[in-house]
Amino acid sequence: MAVIAVILIGIIGQNYNLPLLLGMITVFLATSGGNVINDYFDHKIDAINKPSRPIPSGRISLKNAYSYASILFGLAIIFGILIGYLLDNFIPTLIVSVSSLLMFYYGKTLKKIALIGNIAISFLTGLCFVFAGIIIGVYTSSPGIIHISCYLGFFAGVMTMAREITKDMEDIEGDKLEGAKTLPIVYGNKLSSISTSILMVLACVLSPILYLNNIFNVYFLVILTLAIVIFLYGAYSILKDQTPENCKNVSKLIKIGMMIAFISFAIGSF
C-alpha cells in the first residue's frame, strides 16, 4: 500500500520521472524493513497472538531477521541518497533516513505507548504521499503537487490511525503479557472503539473536500461512496462488537476501504 501511495502521486501529478521510480523502490525497501524489525521486536507477542508467523514458528531466527531488517533499511537509505543526488535536493534523503529510524524506534519502544505508537505509524503512512509529492514537486518545480500530497497524506493517516487502534484491540491479550500500554489496555476496548469510529466517520465527512477544492473530479466521489459505506459499516461494527475476531474483520474492512479510496484518488485525477 505504501508503494501504491507513491504510484498514485505519480498518476495525479502525471509524472513518472526516474527519481519517482527510485522512490517506489525506496518505499518498498524501507517499509519492508519496518515490517521485519517489527516482527523481530514482537516475537514474544506474536508467539501468543500469531504463532504461525515466521519468527515464533521457528522458520526464521531472530539473528537473521535483525540482519535482514538492517540490510533493507541500509538499501533504502542508499536509494534515498541517490534520489537526493538526482534532484540536487536532499529532503527526500532526510525523509527516508528519519522514517527508517522512526520505524526501528516504533518497533522497539513507541508501539507499546498508548496512542504514541499509533500516531507514529499514521504519520509514516501519510508521509509516503508527501515523500512522492516532494520528489515530483522538486523535479518539476511545481509546489501544487506537494500540497495535494499533503491532503492525501492526512486522510491516509486518519484511516491508518483507525486501523492501528483496531489492531491493538485485536492483539490486547498478547500485548498485556508483554507489558504494553496500548490504548485498549490503558482505557479499555469501549473507548478505543469509540475513538476508531470517530476517526472513520471523520474521514468520511471530510473526504469530499478533495472534490470541493477541485483536486479531483466527480468520478472520485462516485468510487469514494463505496469506501465511505465500508468505513461507516466498520464504525458501526466495532461499536457493536469489540471481540478480537470482529476487530480482525474490521481491520480488514478498513484496509479494503483504503484500497478503494486509493482507486478513487487515481480515477478522480484524470
Image (cartoon, rainbow, N blue to C red):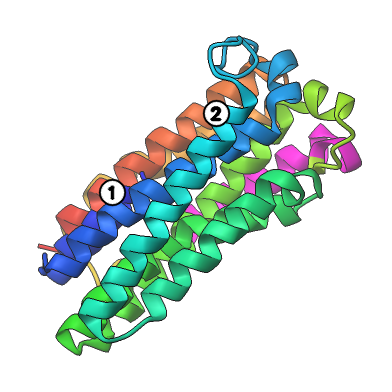
Q: Residues within 10 Å of mark 2 (few under 14, many from 20)?
A: few
Q: Is 62 left or right of 97, judged from the image as shown?
A: right
Q: Say the numbered circle drawn on residue 4.
A: 1
Q: Residue 208, how many percent across, how many down?
A: 36, 63
Q: Please report the bounds of the magenta region as a residue range.
A: 184-210
Residue bearing the label numbered 2: 64
Inspect the image, locate mark 1, and give the three-letter code of the amino acid beneath it.
Ile
Towards the viewer: 82 or 256? 82
> For the point 37% across and 81% down, which residue is it?
90
Q: Residue 128, how many percent across, how many down?
A: 40, 60
Tell me the quarter of the image containing the C terminus: bottom left
Per the picture, the main secondary structure of the magenta-coloured stretch is helix
Q: Is 83 left or right of 112, judged from the image as shown?
A: left
Q: Residue 96, how many percent across, how many down?
A: 44, 65
Towards the viewer: 196 or 255? 255
Q: Say the numbered circle drawn on residue 259.
A: none
> Does residue 193 belong to the magenta stretch?
yes
Q: Quadrant of residue 80?
A: bottom left
> Does residue 130 belong to the magenta stretch?
no
Inspect the image, locate mark 2, and give the three-letter code of the amino acid beneath it.
Asn
Q: Residues within 10 Å of mark 1 (few under 14, many from 20)?
A: some
Q: Quadrant of residue 268?
A: bottom left
Q: Secondary structure at mark 2?
A: helix
Tell me the quarter of the image containing the N terminus: top left
> For the point 35% across and 80% down, which residue is it?
147
> For the point 18% across and 81% down, which residue is it?
139
**Residue 265 visible in the picture:** no
**Residue 120 visible in the picture:** yes
Q: Nearer the viewer, mark 1 or mark 2?
A: 2
Q: Quadrant of residue 173?
A: top right
Q: Is 93 left or right of 176, judged from the image as shown?
A: left
